[in-house]
Image (cartoon, rainbow, N blue to C red):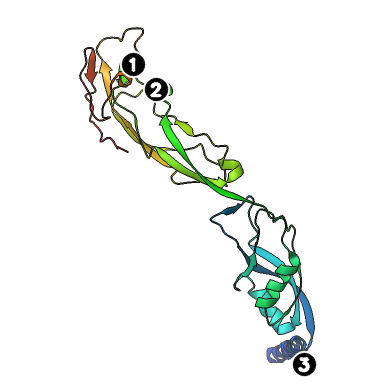
Amino acid sequence: MAKAIPTPRPIRLTKILVSMLAAALFWMMNSLNRDYYSLNVEYPIRFIYDDSLYIPVSPLPQTITVNVSGVGWELLGHSLLPLQAKPVDYYVRNPLRASAINTSSLTAAFADQIKDVRVNYVLADTLEVAFDRRMIKSVRIIADSARIDMAPQFVITSVINITPSHIQVGGPERLVSGLPDTVRLQIPRKRISDNYDEEIPILAFQHPQLRTSTNRVFVSFEVAELLSPLPPTAPQTVSAAMPGPANRTTERPGVRTSRTRNRTNRSQ
């Protein structure tokens, strides 16, 4: 009778794997403790300048790649958690004259902060920077009354209120200085036949480097229905001949106040 061939015991294979893993780990720890390595590591950077007077005309880099040298264990920690380190401060002394990052001073700044490794040099795809004077301009917002779409036989019978009537626009001087003093706001609703009171977005300042004090305004005005057509020479907006507060509507011959629910006008 043939004898059965014995199969390898699983425990022997496990011991072999554990021995190989322990040997590899011992070699790695020994190597990291003794050998000196170089590594490119990405660190956060913070640009220091008077941001009340100057503004960058292009986005500043948030991180900089630095070549560092050191013992293996130290480099391993920097490579695993580089972005959790404290940002390195880079001072821009004269923003209007700055056109590029000074790599010598930046390398020195990294060396002052990173003590456990040696900082060799700074790497970057681009080192260009550019600044402009920060400028703020007040822009008046008015309604484009000539393009308000009224329903037939309906007219505006009050002053068109806009709140706020002025907004502040800030950004680089080269952009802000060219902005108009007044912006006409279009009323989006069609065939208006009742008192108007809505919030409208301002779409005139969409450049990514411009910041506004608000991006929406409230617009309100009163509406009435004509009982008879206006004379051919009369304006289409009755409010043009009506001085006085915006929320006062006067009954006139041939004009009937809108019987829809009045909305509360927002004053400036």
Q: Which residue does the numbered mark 1 point to in the structure image?
A: 152
Mark 1–mark 2 distance (CA, rounded to whole Å) = 9 Å
Could you tell me which secondary element the residue under label 2 belongs to?
loop
| Image position of 150 (left or right of 134) | left
- CA gap, disc 2 to disc 3? 102 Å
Callout 1 secondary element: loop
Please name whichever residue, 95 or 215, is drawn nearer the observer in this view of the structure.
95
Among numbered discs 2 and 3, the one appearing first in the sequence: 3
Figure disc tally? 3
Which mark is drawn over residue 137?
A: none
Quarter of the image holding residue 255? Answer: top left
> Which residue is labeled 2 in the image?
149
In the image, taking residue 162 as reference, residue 207 lies left or right, namely right
What type is the residue that disc 2 sits on? Asp
Identified at 28% across, 35% down, the residue is 265
Alpha-carbon distance for marks 3 and 1? 108 Å
Query: Where residue 237 sits in the image (x, y, percent)?
Result: 34, 19
Which residue corresponds to the image point at 77% horizontal and 92% vertical from the top-left? 3
Residue 159: give x, y in percent of width and height. Answer: 31, 27
